[in-house]
Image (cartoon, grey):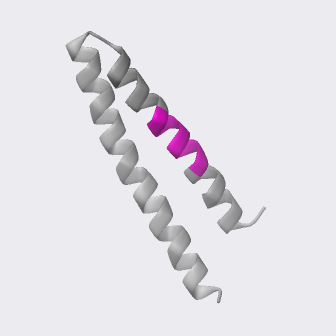
């Protein structure tokens, strides 16, 4: 597996986790848990963006 493929796989996993965190935040009535999942979601959005940026960089340099 190439680095690009590894990053694509990591991004897909991170996006899946992001979706789960968003769902958990919306589903719970516990305000403490809601806040925790919202924070985790924000963190994961940053992680996804970093992975996307790296993939974009790799695509630019391999063309």
**Is residue 63 rendered to the left or right of residue 57?**
right
Q: Position of residue 5 (x, y in %)?
A: 70, 62
Q: Does the magenta stretch include residue 51?
A: no
Q: Give the range drawn in magenta.
A: 12-19
Q: What residue do we see at 66% from left, 67% from top? A: 4
Describe residue 27's horizontal placement relative to residue 14 as left or right: left
Residue at the spot 28% in from the left edge and 25% down from the top edge:
36
Q: In the rendered view, would you say 19 is above or below 60? A: above
Residue shown at 33% from the left, 13% from the top: 28
The overriding secondary structure of the stretch rendered in magenta is helix
Q: How many marks?
A: 0
Q: Is residue 12 left or right of residue 57?
A: right
Q: In this view, does 50 lie to the left or right of 32?
A: right
As drawn, which residue projects farthest toward the right?
Answer: 1
For the residue pair 9 and 1, the one nearer the viewer reads as 9
Magenta highlight on residue 15: yes
The residue closer to the viewer here, 33 or 2, is: 33
């Amino acid at each position: 597996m190439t680095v690009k493929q590894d990053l694509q796989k990591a991004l897909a996993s991170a996006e899946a986790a992001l979706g789960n965190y968003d769902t958990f935040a919306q589903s719970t009535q516990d305000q403490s848990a809601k806040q925790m999942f919202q924070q985790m979601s924000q963190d994961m959005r940053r992680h996804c963006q970093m992975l996307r940026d790296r993939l974009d960089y790799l695509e630019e340099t391999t063309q």
